[in-house]
Amino acid sequence: MNSGKNSGEILFAVKKRNFIWRQVGKRRNELEWTQCDLADRLVDAGWQNATRSTVSKIEDGSLRIDLTQLYYLAVALRVHPIHFLPKMDWSKPVKTQIYSQ
């Protein structure tokens, strides 16, 4: 059965499970923190099992982020949760907006 997608599109869809990865990495770098530093701050914010590996998976887009985790990230990185969301352009498809950041 052919879904109409080529293997590159399928691989991208599987790999990118969150669309905040660029903003997380950018903010962490602005603060001059290591991934371990952010993991420690995530634990302090309430994300009990956050590790450097967790941060790495967030930043490469492979870890799905729920709303609670989004708030932990916002607290840890000292930004409002809206900071992670792309600006809306009502004339473009949602996928284009999310993955072209």
Image (spheres, rainbow, N blue to C red):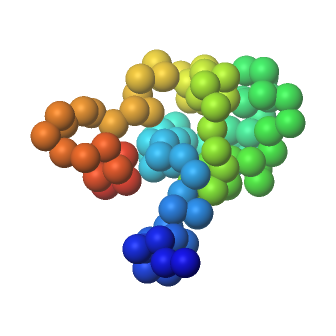
Q: Is residue 67 above or below residue 12?
A: above
Q: Is residue 94 above or below residue 90?
A: below
In this view, the residue in front, 68 or 35, is: 68
Residue for point 77% across, 34% down = 40
Which residue is most to the front?
A: 1
- Residue 5's quadrant in the figure? bottom left
In this view, the residue in front, 9 or 59, is: 9
In this view, the residue in front, 58 or 79, is: 58
Q: Is residue 61 above or below residue 6?
A: above
Residue for point 56% across, 24% down = 74
Residue for point 77% across, 54% down = 53
Position of the N terminus by quadrant = bottom right
- Residue 44's quadrant in the figure? top right
Which residue is most to the left?
A: 91
Q: Is residue 3 visible?
A: yes
In the picture, measured across the screen, residue 83 lies left or right of residue 56, that is: left
How many marks the image carries: the answer is 0
Question: Residue 77, how many percent across, how many down?
Answer: 56, 29
Which residue is most to the right?
A: 49
Q: Is residue 59 visible?
A: no
Question: Residue 90, how many percent across, how many down?
Answer: 17, 34
Question: Residue 34, how many percent across, how many down?
Answer: 65, 48
Residue for point 64% across, 31% down = 66
Question: Residue 67, how many percent across, how many down?
Answer: 61, 25
